[in-house]
Image (cartoon, grey):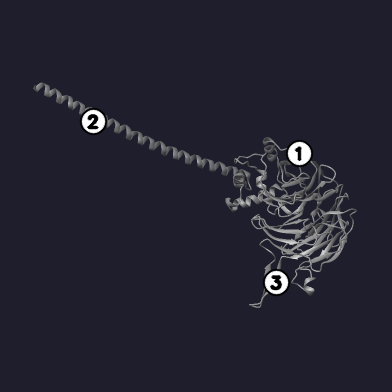
Amino acid sequence: MATEVALSASNTDNTIYVWDIRSGSSLFSFKQSMSQKGGLALVSKPGASFQIGSIVTAQTDRAILNVYQWQRDQVLHKMNTAEKMVSVASSHQGQYLAAATVSGKVYLWHVPTGHLMRVFEAHYRRITRLAFSNDDSTLLTASEDAAVNVWLLAHLLSPVSADGYEDITARPAPLYSWSDHTLPVSDIYIGNGNLSGARVCTASLDHTVKLWDLATGQLLTTFLFPKAVSSVIMDPSETTIFAACEDKIYSVDLYKRRQDQSYKINTVESLGGMSRVESIGIKSTTPNMTGDQGKSAMLGSVFIGHTGEINSLTLSFDGTILISGAEDGNCIVWDVLSRQPLRKFESHKGPVSHVACFLRPIELHPDAPTQNIIPMPWKQLKRAMPTTEEEHRDASQQTIQNTSIDLNAHQHLVESGPAYSSLTTELKPIQKASNAIRDMKTDDSSAGLQNQVNALQAELMRLNEHHLKSKSLHNEMYTLVVDKFMEERRNKRKLDQEDEEEEEEEEDEQ
C-alpha cells in the first residue's frame, strides 16, 4: 500500500527529517545540510516522476550543492558550484537541475551527464523561487525585483541569436515577463497540465496572490490579503488556494455556488477572472454597507496555530491534509475540511524553511529488498560549459538501467508499429538476428544444421537453374542478332553486284 511521508528542512538546523504524516513519527534523517527557503529540491527517478530518488540542497554558507539518497543519511555527493546558490529546482522527469544566485543568475545542468547546459541572467536581483512546469517545457523564475519570468526550456538548451543561428552566448528572451507585483515575489505554484492549459499562482510581499494563464500569459485574478503572502499552493483539483500570511493560512474557494432566481436552480461560477481583484479576509469598508455587513470579512477561511511566519506549505495527494512549516520550528498537520490541527512535528531546533509531501520511497519500507534497489546515478556537476567533443563522449557513455526490461518494452512498441516507437532502426537488426537464431534452435542441433545445409543446397540449385535459363536466353538472342546481321549483309552485297552488272551492260551497248 502506498503511503505518504513529509520532508522538512531548516536554514539553521543541520538535519533534514522524513516523517509519517499520519503518525508524526520520524522515519529517516539526513545530516549536514542547512538550506534557505527555496533551496531544496526533490529529484525524481528517471522515468518515474512519482518516485523521489535524490534530494538536492543549496547550502547557506558555501557554494556547494549537497546530494542525498535513501541508501545513507550522510551527503552522497558534494557538488562545487561557481557561485553560492540560494534557490534550486529539478524537472519532473529528473533530467535537469536549475539553481539560482543572489545576483539573479540561473545555472542549468543535465543530471545524467553533469553538463552545464546554460548560464544566463534571468533577473537583476536575488531569485527567490525556481519551478518547472509539469511537462518540463518551461522554467519559471521569481525574484526580489518583483518580476516573474517564464522561459522555454527548449530555448535555454538550444539558444538562438537574433540572426537565427545557434549561439550559446546569446541572452535568452523570456516567453512571458510578469511584472504586475509591486514588491518582491515570495513563492510560485504551477498547477496541473501542460503549457497550453496550466495555471500559475504567484505570491508577493505586496499582500497579493495573482492567478495567471500559462498558455496566454494573461492575468486572470488578483487576490488581496490583509498581510504579506509568504507561500501559496493549490489543492489537486485546483478549486482552492491556500496562502500563508505571516502566522495564518487563508483558504480561498475559486468556485462559488449561486442561486439563479429566474429558474430557481443552483449554479457554480468561478471567482474573479478578467483581471479582477478579490479581497480575502479583509473587512469591507464600503460606505453603503451598514450593520454587520460592514464588519464581516468577505471571503476565506483561516488556519490559526503557528506563532511564527510560515515559510512553506504542502498538501497530501488527495488534498485532505495540509502541512505547514514556520519560523517557530514546528510543522503542523491540518485537516483541510475542519481547519483543525491534527498533530505537530517539533523535532527541528530552528526555523523550518521547507516542507514537502510525497509517496513513501521503497527504500524506507521495513520489508523492502534494499539490496536489489539500484541508486539513482549522478555525475559531478560541471562548473564550465562543455565542448562538443565532451558532449558526444559523455552522451555515448550513458547507460540505461534495467536494459532487458527497457528493450522488451521498446520491442513491444516496434511490433505494434513503427509509428509508436522512435527506435525502429536500432532494434531492427536485433530482431532479425533473434529470428534467425530462433529458427536455428531445435531439440537436435545436428538436425538443425542439416536443415540449414538442405536449405542452402536448394538455394544453390535454384540459382543454377536461373543461370542456365539466362544463358540459354542469351544464346538465343545472340544467334538471332548475328543471323539477322549476316542476312542483311548478304542482301546488300547481292544488290551491289546487280547494280554493277547493269552499269556494265549499259556501257557495252554504248
Q: Which residue lies furthest to the left in this view?
A: 510
Q: Which mark is residue 32?
A: none
The residue tagged 1 is: 383
Task: Tell me, yes or no, if residue 374 can be seen here.
Answer: no
Horizontal side of 500 relative to 280 (left or right) equals left
Q: Where is residue 449 in the image (x, y as percent from the top left)?
A: 59, 42
Upstream in the sequence, badge 3 or badge 1? 3
Q: How far apart are marks 2 and 1 (CA)?
A: 93 Å
Q: Are there few (<14), some (14-19), or many (20+) residues within 10 Å of tag 1? A: some
Query: How many numbered circles are shown?
Result: 3
Q: 158 or 104: nearer the eye?
A: 104
Give the amino acid type for the residue marked by disc 2 in the picture. Asn
Upstream in the sequence, badge 2 or badge 1? 1
Residue 279, relative to residue 418: is it above or below?
Answer: below
Give the amino acid type for the residue marked by disc 1 in the picture. Arg
Q: Are there few (<14), some (14-19), or many (20+) residues within 10 Å of tag 2? A: few
- The quarter of the picture where the C terminus appears is top left
Q: Are there few (<14), some (14-19), or many (20+) residues within 10 Å of tag 3? A: few
Q: Residue at x 88, y 60 (%)?
A: 307
Q: Residue furthest front?
A: 287
Task: Tell me, yes or no, if residue 6 can be seen here.
Answer: yes
Badge nearest the viewer, 3 or 1: 3
Q: Which mark is residue 491?
A: 2
Q: Are marks 2 and 1 in contact (CB under 8 Å)?
A: no
Q: 371 or 231: nearer the eye?
A: 231
Element class at badge 3 = strand
- The quarter of the picture where the N terminus appears is bottom right
Q: Residue at x 32, y 32 (%)?
A: 482
Q: Where is residue 322 in the image (x, y as percent from the top left)?
A: 80, 62
Q: Residue furthest right?
A: 349
The residue tagged 3 is: 257
Q: How far apart are marks 2 and 3 (CA)?
A: 110 Å
